[in-house]
Image (spheres, grey):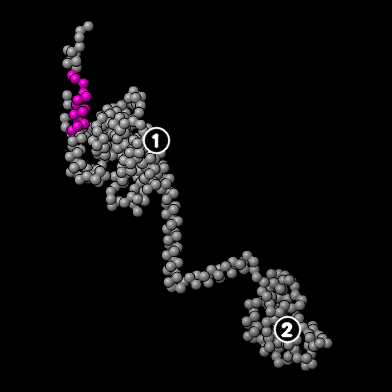
C-alpha cells in the first residue's frame, strides 16, 4: 500500500496555504492544519492512490476540518478570524495580509476555488474531482473568480496623489 | 488604476503571497507523522511475521510436516530435559551393593560363562556396552543382576564365593566391578 504521508513536509505547506487562504493566516489555520494531519493519520488506510494523489486527499480532509472550525466559531463566514494586527507581524507576513484580506472579501465559492488553486496548488481537474465539477467548469469558475478579485483589488487602490492634493483645501 | 494588468499577474501574486507555515508547525507535524509511521511499521512487521508463520504451517501441514516437526520438537524437549535434569538410567535390577557413582554410570548385567549354569555373575557395565555384551556373551546372559533363576540349585559350585546358596535356595551373586571413570574409585 502506498503511504500518503511518506513525505509530509511539502504536503504540510500545501495544506497550510489552502487553509490560510480560506480562513486567514494565523493560529487557527495552524490548528486546522494540525487537525487535518491528525485525521489523515487516523484514516490513512482509506487513502486510495487510484483515486487521486495525497495532496488532493489531504485537502479533502482539510475542507471538512475548516467546515468544523467555521461551525464552532461565532464569526460570520465572510469575516477574517482574529489574527494579529499587521504591525505585530513581520515584514513578510504584512506583505501577504493584503492578498489574504482580499480573498476574505470574496464570496465563499470564489474564495474556495482560489484557495484550492493557488493555496493548495491543485489542478483544475483535481478541484473538479473534489467539488464534483467538470474540469472546464472549474476553469471557467476560476477565471471569473480571478476577474472579480482583480476588480476588487483595483477598486481599492488609492487615487493618484495629484488628484488628492487638488481636492484638499489650502490651509 | 489597474494594479494587475491581466490574470497571469494576479495568479503570480497569489502564488507568491501564499501563506507559509511556521517552521515549528512543519517540524511538529512531521515528527508526529514520523512517529506514527514508525509505530505502524512495527505493527506491519508483526503482522507479516504472523502471516508468514501461518503460511509455513499450512505448507507443512499439506506435506505431513507437522507431525515430523512435532516429533522433532518432542525430541528437542527430551534432550533439553536431559540436559536440565538428567534421567537416571533405571537398571532392570540393581545390584545390592554399588556405590553411588556406579549407580550413576553403570547398569547391571548378568553374564553367563559357557554352559555352566552356576557360573554367572553380575557385572556393572556402561550402558553403551550392553548391546555388545548381549551379542558376545554366552547364552543366558541378560541385563540386570543375576537372580536365582540364573543358577541351577545343587549343580556345580560358585567359584566366586560371593554369594552362598541360602536355605530357601535363593542366592544373589553380586560382583562389584568398578570401572573407573572420571578418576573416581
Residue A71 rendering spot, x and y as whole percentages? 35, 36
Quarter the N terminus of chain B occupies: top left
The quadrant holding residue A145 is top left
Q: Contact, CB < 8 Å: mark 2 with mark 1? A: no
Kindly identify which chain the residue marked by label 1 belongs to: B
Segment colored magenta: A147-160
The quadrant holding residue B133 is bottom right
Mark 2 lies on a secondary structure that is: loop
Residue B153 rendering spot, x and y as whole percentages? 78, 91
Q: Which residue is mark 1?
A: B24
Q: Which residue does the image show at 43% across and 71% down from the upper left? A: B62
Q: Is residue B140 magenta?
A: no
How crowded is the residue under tag 2: few (<14 C-alpha within 10 Å), some, or many (20+)?
A: many
Real-space Cα distance between discs 2 and 1?
Answer: 92 Å
Q: Is residue B81 visible?
A: yes
Residue A15 rendering spot, x and y as whole percentages? 32, 39
Query: B174 above or below B15?
Result: below
Left or right position of B24 against A95: right
Quarter the C terminus of chain B occupies: bottom right
Left or right position of A66 against B31: left
Mark 1 lies on a secondary structure that is: helix
Left or right position of A24 against B95: left
Q: Which residue is mark 2?
A: B146
Amino acid at each position: 500500500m502506498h503511504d500518503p504521508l511518506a513525505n509530509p513536509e511539502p504536503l504540510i505547506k500545501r495544506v497550510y496555504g489552502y487553509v490560510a487562504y480560506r480562513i486567514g493566516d494565523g493560529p487557527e489555520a495552524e490548528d486546522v492544519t494540525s487537525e487535518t494531519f491528525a485525521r489523515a493519520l487516523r484514516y490513512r488506510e482509506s487513502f486510495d492512490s487510484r483515486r487521486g494523489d495525497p495532496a488532493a486527499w489531504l485537502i479533502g480532509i482539510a475542507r471538512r476540518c475548516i467546515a468544523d472550525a467555521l461551525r464552532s466559531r461565532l464569526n460570520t463566514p465572510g469575516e477574517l478570524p482574529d489574527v494579529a494586527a499587521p504591525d505585530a507581524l513581520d515584514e513578510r507576513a504584512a506583505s501577504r495580509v493584503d492578498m489574504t484580506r482580499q480573498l476574505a472579501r470574496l464570496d465563499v465559492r470564489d474564495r474556495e476555488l482560489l484557495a484550492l488553486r493557488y493555496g493548495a496548488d491543485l489542478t483544475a481537474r483535481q478541484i473538479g474531482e473534489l467539488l464534483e465539477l467538470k474540469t472546464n467548469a472549474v476553469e471557467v469558475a476560476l477565471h471569473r473568480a480571478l476577474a472579480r478579485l482583480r476588480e476588487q483589488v483595483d477598486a481599492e487602490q488609492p487615487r493618484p496623489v495629484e488628484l488628492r492634493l487638488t481636492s484638499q483645501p489650502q490651509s | 488604476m489597474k494594479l494587475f494588468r491581466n490574470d497571469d499577474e494576479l495568479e503570480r501574486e497569489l502564488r507568491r503571497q501564499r501563506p507559509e507555515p511556521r517552521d515549528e508547525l512543519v517540524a511538529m507535524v512531521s515528527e508526529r507523522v514520523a512517529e506514527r509511521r514508525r509505530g505502524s511499521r512495527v505493527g506491519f512487521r508483526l503482522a507479516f511475521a504472523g502471516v508468514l508463520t501461518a503460511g509455513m504451517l499450512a505448507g507443512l501441514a499439506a506435506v505431513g510436516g507437522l507431525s515430523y516437526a512435532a516429533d522433532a520438537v518432542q525430541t528437542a524437549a527430551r534432550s533439553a530435559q536431559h540436559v536440565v535434569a538428567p534421567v537416571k538410567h533405571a537398571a532392570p535390577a540393581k545390584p545390592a551393593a554399588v556405590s553411588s557413582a556406579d549407580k550413576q554410570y553403570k547398569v547391571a548385567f548378568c553374564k553367563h560363562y559357557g554352559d555352566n549354569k552356576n557360573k554367572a555373575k553380575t557385572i556393572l557395565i556402561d550402558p553403551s556396552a550392553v548391546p555388545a555384551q548381549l551379542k558376545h556373551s554366552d547364552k543366558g546372559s541378560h541385563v540386570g543382576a543375576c537372580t536365582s533363576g540364573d543358577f541351577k540349585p545343587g549343580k556345580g559350585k560358585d567359584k566366586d564365593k560371593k554369594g552362598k546358596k541360602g536355605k530357601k535356595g535363593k542366592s544373589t551373586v553380586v560382583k562389584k566391578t568398578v570401572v573407573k571413570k572420571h578418576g573416581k574409585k
